Amino acid sequence: MALCSGIGRHFRAAYRPLLFSRSIRTSGLFAMPIEVGDKLPSVDVFEGTPNNKVNIQELFSKVKKGVLFAVPGAFTPGCSKTHLPGFVSGYDKLKEKGVEVVACVSVNDPFVMAAWGESAGAEGKVRMLADTCAEFTKAIEMDLDATKFLGNVRSKRYTVVIENGMVREVMVEPDGTGLTCTLFENILDRI
Ligand code: BEZ
């Protein structure tokens, strides 16, 4: 045991520069917590149907400014009554600040995400992205074990501001699911 952890320490020390290089961070192959200065990892999520892939890195690298927020679950009370509606009603203010893409991601299937977006009036404002197998969520270490209350792994609630393809702000709810720093009204001044 002691030997193994000793080897691990030397291995990590030797490979630290490689593990922390930007290309490794953004490849989507290894889970790394998302940080200011990173690109989003190159992972496909789904919009509308399982056939419609959207590469999340490409989506945000095409625009000058973007906002991505993540929720623990479509149609859950806090996400439906507070988090998503805030970005839908605040969309014009984000646009005035030069934000070209606003997207919501959740570990749900794409049909559920589409139905949720429709019920919230998100069309043309907030892109509703399904991280069906939590691949994107795990790549940025935002996964939340919600097995006891939602049945499976979900996403922590967070909001990321992206500028010229690089993460400029990361806000994560301290308890993973609360409704504080990640809400529209609390990120507007940070854009
Ligand atoms: C919510 O209402 O946002 C919520 C409910 C259960 C688990 C996580 C979030």
Image: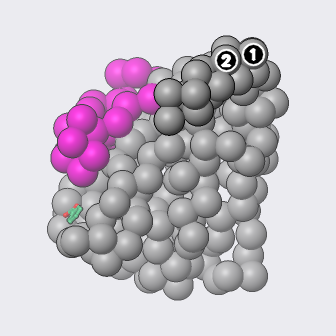
Front-most of residues 66 and 169: 169
Residue 17: x %, y % from top left: 75, 15
Mark 2 C-beta closer than 8 Å to ligand 1: no
Q: Residue at x 53, y 53 (%)?
A: 137
Determine whether the residue tagged by mark 1 lies in a helix, strand or loop: helix
Q: Quadrant of residue 57?
A: top right
Amino acid type, mark 1 = Ala
Going by the numbered disc 2, the residue's amino acid type is: His
- The quadrant where residue 186 appears: top left
Label 2 and label 1: CA atoms lie apart by 6 Å
Disc number for residue 75: none
| x, y percent for residue 101 | 60, 46
- The picture places residue 51, in percent across and down from the top left corner, at 75, 82
Residue of label 2: 10
Labels 2 and 1 touching (C-beta < 8 A) = yes
Q: Residues within 10 Å of mark 1 (few under 14, many from 20)?
A: few
Q: Is residue 63 left or right of residue 132?
A: right
Tell me: residue 130, above or below residue 41: below
Q: Is residue 62 left or right of residue 187?
A: right
Q: Is residue 14 shown to the viewer in this render?
A: yes
- The residue positioned 50% from the left and 43% from the top of the image is 141
Is 150 colored magenta in this rendering?
no
| Quarter of the rendered structure image containing ligand 1 | bottom left
Mark 2, secondary structure of its residue: helix
Query: Which segment is the magenta one?
Result: 170-191
Numbered tag placed on residue 14 in the rendering: 1
